[in-house]
Amino acid sequence: DAEITQSPRHKITETGRQVTLACHQTWNHNNMFWYRQDLGHGLRLIHYSYGVQDTNKGEVSDGYSVSRSNTEDLPLTLESAASSQTSVYFCASSDVRNEKLFFGSGTQLSVL
Amino acid sequence: RKEVEQDPGPFNVPEGATVAFNCTYSNSASQSFFWYRQDCRKEPKLLMSVYSSGNEDGRFTAQLNRASQYISLLIRDSKLSDSATYLCVVNTPGTYKYIFGTGTRLKVLA
C-alpha cells in the first residue's frame, strides 16, 4: 500500500547542530508539506513543494530549509538547531486532483 | 483575527450524546474544507471533506455556511472511541496550502 513515512520518530540534539528529518512518500503525490505542531498554535506550515525542484516558504520557515530532488522525498533541514525548534514535526502530501492531505506519523524533536 | 478559529473545548459528553463543533474562517475565497481527527501524539487523519451541499458519513455530518463563513461537524450517538481532537482545515485560495485550526477536544464519557 502507498504510504508516507518519516524518520526518525524521535530525535534529541544539541543547540547549534544541523539536523535533517526525512520524509518519503510512495503516493506519487506532487505536493509535499512540512508542518510543526506546538501547544496553543496548532499545525503551522514550514515549507512546501509542488514538485521536483520546487520549494516554497511557509509561515514559520526561518531556520529551516528543504530540497526536492525527486517526487518521493522532501527532507527538512534545521541549519543550526535552536531550543525554540523543539516540536513535533509532521510531513504531509497531497494529490492535485483530490487535495486531501495525508500525514506521516511525525517526528518528535528535542533541542537541548 | 485568526484565519481559522475553533473553540478549543474540551467538550465532555456522555456516550450516545450528539455533539456539534463549529469552525469559522476569515477568507471568503476559500474553496476546500475538511475535518481531520487527531488522537493524542498521533498524526492528523482525514475524517471527511465538507461540501457546499453538506455531507454525511455514518454518524458524522459536515456542513458549510458560506454566508457566515463557518463549517460545522455533527457527531451523533457518540462513542468512547470518538474522543480525540477535531481539526478544521481550510485551503488558501489559488494554492494547495491549507490552514489548520488549533482543534476542538472531545471527550466522550462512559
Image (spheres, coloured by chain):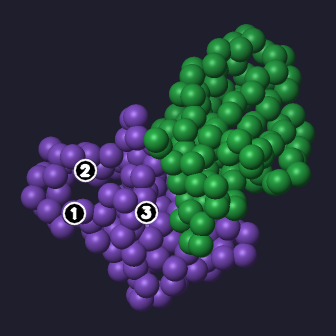
- Determine the CA span between mark 1 and mark 2: 9 Å
> Quick one: SS at disc 2?
helix
Dot 1 or dot 3: first in sequence order is 3
Q: Is residue B46 left or right of residue A59?
A: right
Drawn colour of chain A?
A: purple
Q: Residues within 10 Å of mark 1 (few under 14, many from 20)?
A: few
Per the image, the residue denoted by label 3 is: A34
Quadrant containing the N terminus of chain A is bottom right
Colour green belongs to chain:
B
Mark toward the start of the polypeptide (3 vs 2): 3
Q: Residue at x 80, y 30 (%)?
A: B75
Q: Chain of mark 1?
A: A
Residue topped by disc 2: A85
> Residue A63, which numbered label?
1
In the image, which disc is placed on residue B33? none
Where on the picture, by quarter, is residue A59? Answer: bottom left
Q: Nearer the viewer, residue A1 or B107?
A: B107
Q: Can residue B74 be seen here?
A: yes
Letter of the chain that mark 3 sits on in the rendering: A
Given contact means CB atoms under 8 Å apart, are the residues at marks 1 and 2 in contact?
A: yes
Say which residue appears at 64% left-offset and 61% top-offset.
B29
Residue kind at label 2, given as amino acid type: Gln
Does A73 sit left or right of B52 as displayed?
left
